[in-house]
Amino acid sequence: MPDLDAARQTATLLENAVRGVVRGQDAALRNILACFAAGGHALVEDVPGTGKTTLAKGIAKSVGGVIFKRVQFTPDLLPADILGVSIFDPRTQEFRFREGPVFADILLADEINRASPRTQSALLEAMAERQATIDGVRHDLNGLFFVLATQNPVEFRGTYPLPEAQMDRFMIRSRLGYVSAEEERAILADQVHAHPVDTMQPVVSREQLVELLAAVKEVRISEELRGYIVDVVSSTRGRREVQLAASPRASLALMKMSQALSLLEGRDFVVPETIQAVAADVIAHRLVIAPEAKLSGTNGRHVVASILEEIPVPA
């Protein structure tokens, strides 16, 4: 049985360490760390310079013993550049498999929408099943395997929108946004001589992180709240403004995110407010809005907000 108090302490140490290098993004940072603790993958969508890459590096440097790899997605990137390739060794007269960046604990997929759909799809199996099939051979991803992908929502030239199946693999889509003027002054002061992420030291071990992931599953969520989650997700189906609704994978993701965020908030049980707080980040990016609704300014987050107002909260 995982020690919830020890897991909560691990989460606090990790959050405080990353908060020291990513200023003014407390809410988004906590959600992304909750996604990590829940065993999911996060898509961070924001304009350049808001700290997306620093966030990924900060998480990786805060944990001792993890393998961190970064892939800069470009139009000429091939699936083999991510998964790995078999190379013929003339000395042994055999093919030897060389692992790609996907064999990591934390993978930063930088500007993921700049790669072709063929290359994007190379991550589908790995993200869903934690395995990669290469040359007909299945390779298990034994690491923690957390994908933190970034994309710029403004620049569309030379990009390939992520297909619905790829978007559905991300537990959450989050945005950082601009910081306040006060926080920006603090960022400048931090980086007068060097970037603070360069001097970061591990504050938790890989073993402690594994225990944190196990502890999240022990956070209690009542049958009534599980039903509430299903009601919220199923309400996306059959709405006129929604062309493609959320699947049961969204319900699972919302439950796991609620458990992880509850632990980070210091509780060993889930409350309705936590579910409501993460519902938009978990559900909105999975919805395809009907063209006529999109023209009127409706987006996925609007739909989720409307559903949360409609569905009664369990007493």
Image: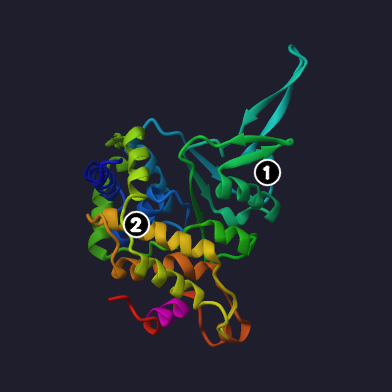
| Circle 1 crowding by C-alpha within 10 Å: few under 14, some 14–19, many from 20 | many
- Residue type at numbered disc 1: Pro
Q: Nearer the viewer, residue 110 or 254?
A: 254
x%, y% of residue 110?
Answer: 52, 50
x%, y% of residue 103?
Answer: 55, 35
Q: Main secondary structure of the magenta part?
A: helix
**Residue depicted at x 48% and y 70%:** 284
| Circle 2 crowding by C-alpha within 10 Å: few under 14, some 14–19, many from 20 | many
Question: Which SS class for mark 1?
Answer: helix
Magenta residues span 302-308
* Image position of 249 (left or right of 17): right
Examine the rendered structure and indicate whether residue 83 appears above or below residue 291: above
* Image position of 273 (left or right of 168): left
Question: Which SS class for mark 2?
Answer: helix
Q: Quadrant of the N terminus?
A: top left
* Image position of 4 (left or right of 133): left
Name the residue beneath numbered marker 1.
79
Residue 186 visible in image? yes
Q: CA distance from mark 2 to mark 1?
A: 34 Å
Q: Nearer the viewer, residue 114 or 120?
A: 120
Colour mapping used in the image? rainbow
Mark 2 in CB contact with mark 1 (< 8 angstroms): no
Q: Quadrant of residue 296?
A: bottom right
Q: Earlier in the sequence, mark 2 or mark 1?
A: 1
Name the residue beneath numbered marker 2.
259
x%, y% of residue 84?
Answer: 65, 35
x%, y% of residue 246?
Answer: 54, 70
Task: Determine if the magenta segment contains residue 310.
Answer: no
Examine the rendered structure and indicate whether residue 146 appears above or below residue 269: above
